[in-house]
Image (cartoon, rainbow, N blue to C red):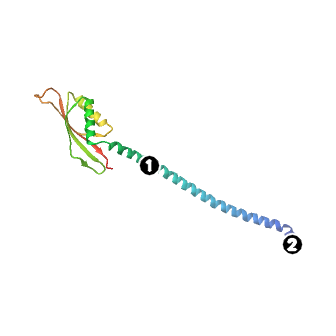
Amino acid sequence: MALTGLVNQYKNRVLNIAVIIIALIIAVNIYKSQARAIAALRESKDTELKKNTVLTSLSLSEKDINHYKEVINKKSISSVINTIGNIANEAGVKITSLRPEQEAVKDYYLKYPFALSVKAKTYHEIGRFISKLEAHPDIYMVELIEIKNEAEESQGKGLVADIKVSTVLLPQ
């Protein structure tokens, strides 16, 4: 009887303790699964942030490429000839002939060569002309240069330079 009395007296407490222990076990399991889900979400978030930074840099690169295409493709044959003439005037050389040659189609660009002859008094003037030409933002490349003294029977002393200059356009 003493045992039954003890059981009846502590029956509610034992039942309450058992319910609390079961509730704690369930809560711990729920916490662990939620912690794993949160860790997975954080990893996913970090991955997506890295993807966004890569996409942002690609977008900026694409904008730069489009800007360069606009800058490079703004020229026509007549504007190229005018630009070369202006650079020659600035450098103090005289263009005696300028003629476009056959364009060359490359994999990623179009190459437009020009053959020109210039007269100058000194090598420095020719060098200044070539330097200004290659430093121009429209992209001009001097591919060939041949410098010789002017013939004795011509009007004065000086130099004649035969130059092959190319410029490029990007296909649209």
To which residue does mark 2 refer? 4
Q: Position of residue 62 (x, y in %)?
A: 41, 48
Secondary structure of the residue carrying numbered label 2: helix
Secondary structure of the residue carrying numbered label 1: helix
User: Within 10 angstroms of label 1, few (less than 14), some, or many (20 or more) residues?
Assistant: few
- Does 158 sit left or right of 23 as displayed? left
Figure quadrant of residue 140: top left
Image quarter where the N terminus lies is bottom right
Q: Position of residue 106 (x, y in %)?
A: 27, 50
Q: State the CA–CA distance, disc 2 to disc 1.
A: 80 Å
- Which residue: 23% across, 47% down? 103
Closer to the camera in the image, 45 or 62: 62
To which residue does mark 1 refer? 59
User: Within 10 angstroms of label 2, few (less than 14), some, or many (20 or more) residues?
Assistant: few
The label nearer to you, 2 versus 1, is: 1
- Residue kind at label 1, given as amino acid type: Ser
Q: Position of residue 75 (x, y in %)?
A: 30, 42
Q: Is residue 118 above or below residue 29?
A: above
Figure quadrant of residue 167: top left
Extreme residue in the left direction: 153
Q: Is residue 103 above or below residue 160?
A: below
